[in-house]
Image: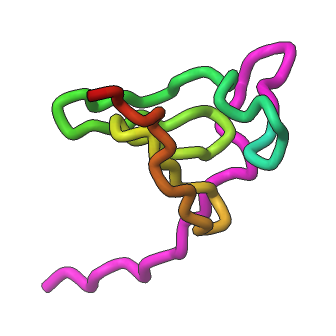
Amino acid sequence: MRTPALLQPTHQPRSLCLHTPACPTAQSADAKAARVVAAHPEQGWSLLCNGVLLFEDTGELLPDGQVIAPHRPAVAD
C-alpha cells in the first residue's frame, strides 16, 4: 500500500513577471499595463503577471483579495 505524500502548501510568487523590465505592481496606477500570463476569454478572465485578475466586465481581483467593481462607461440611450 502506498502512503500518500504530505501536501505542502504552495504559494504564488509575489510577481509572475519574469521579463525585463518588470511590469508595474498590482498597487501601481498603471497595473493593467502588466503582461497577460494566462487568458481564458471563454470564461471571461485574464491573469496578469503582477497577479491581477482582469474580468471581461472590467472588474478586477487584486492579489491581496481586494475586489474592484466593474467600471464600464455609461451607455447612451
Q: Residue furthest left?
A: 1
Left or right of 40? Residue 69 is right
The residue at the point 83 percent across, 23 percent down is 22
Does 9 sit above or below residue 53? below
Question: Which of 13/60 is in front?
Answer: 60
Does 10 sit above or below residue 76? below
- Residue 65: x percent and y percent? 59, 68
Quarter of the image with the N terminus is bottom left
Left or right of 35? Residue 17 is right
Question: Which of 18/52 is in front?
Answer: 52
The residue at the point 37 percent across, 78 percent down is 5
Q: Quadrant of residue 55?
A: top left
Check if residue 4 falls in the magenta segment.
Answer: yes
Q: Main secondary structure of the magenta part?
A: loop
The residue at the point 74 percent across, 17 percent down is 19
Question: Which of 33/57 is in front?
Answer: 57
- Residue 32: x percent and y percent? 65, 30
Quarter of the image with the C terminus is top left
- Residue 35: x percent and y percent? 61, 21
What residue span does the magenta drawing correspond to? 1-24
